[in-house]
Image (tube, helix red, strand yellow):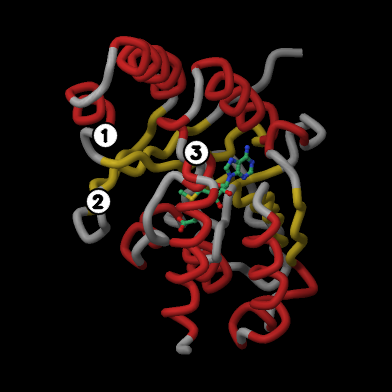
Amino acid sequence: MSKGLSEYRVFWGEFRRNFHTTGALAPSSRYLARALARFVRVDGSGNGRLGSGPRRILEVGPGTGAVTREIVRRLGPDDTLDLVELNATFVEMLRRRLEHDKSFAAVAPRVRIIHDRVESLPLAPTYDVIISGLPLNNFSRESVESILEALEALVKPGGTVSFFEYVAVRPMRRLVSGRKERDRLRDVGEALQSSLKREVRRDCVLANLPPAWVHHLRFGEKEA
Ligand SMILES: C[S@@+](CC[C@H](N)C(=O)[O-])C[C@H]1O[C@@H](n2cnc3c(N)ncnc32)[C@H](O)[C@@H]1O
């Protein structure tokens, strides 16, 4: 089976087994991956007040590595990449890719896979760029708030956090949902709104199934 097909097969299997945390039918398209990785620039630009030295990058929820492939392509020679992934099947697939996939293997010594929830990482300002693929619209308000707090705590002052959500996902799901689910979706929308005050750029990616918004947030100095 070809590499691309096996990626889809694994993703589909995990979608069926773990719908809640996988949250998508298929891996992100290359166009969505490019928009998400926008701030991982080879020349280090686009990172606000951050210098041009080696950068630490975190990808949250890499799944089969569809976005990782684009991040890896843009890594500078001294940049490092941490991948935090909850699902053991995806972790195993990422390990194999780091060993056998040519473009992944080239940067493997600078990539670390962490098999855990992002909320469990030590919460210190560590990363210049964070890219999240988490299906926030599947979670409770409390989970979304604690994930957003974790992302904010993990990003360095001047760093960026990029994440996506499918276009009109909340209004569409509200149309076909009962009261409890509608309330949950409203609460998640409210939780996201406060983070979106930090938005510095928004990309619309039509070439993805379904089309998606990519939000890019920038965080300033932290309070002592
Ligand atoms: C929508 S998929 C995105 C996969 C990939 N980034 C892509 O775009 O194709 C969401 C991923 O987040 C992972 N995930 C869900 N909750 C997580 C958490 N709290 N911490 C880390 N990973 C999580 C899932 O296992 C899954 O791999």
Along the polypeptide, which appears first: circle 2 or circle 3?
A: 3
- Neighbor class of circle 2 (other Cα within 10 Å; few <14, some 14-19, many 20+) is some
Look at mark 2 in the image and give the residue it sits on. Answer: 210
- 150 left or right of 62? right
Q: Helix or strand or loop: what does disc 3 sit on?
A: helix
Q: Nearer the viewer, residue 155 or 23?
A: 23
Position of 1 relative to 95 (above/below): below
Residue depth check, mark 2 versus mark 3: number of the one nearer the observer: 3
| Image x and y of residue 57, in percent | 65, 53
| Image x and y of residue 65, in percent | 55, 65
- Neighbor class of circle 3 (other Cα within 10 Å; few <14, some 14-19, many 20+) is some
Look at mark 3 in the image and give the residue it sits on. Answer: 20
Q: Quote the CA–CA distance across marks 2 and 1.
A: 9 Å
Ligand 1 under 8 Å from disc 2 Cβ: no
Look at mark 1 in the image and give the residue it sits on. Answer: 169
Q: Are marks 3 and 1 in contact (CB under 8 Å)?
A: no
Query: Who's the residue at 61% across and 44% down the image?
Result: 50
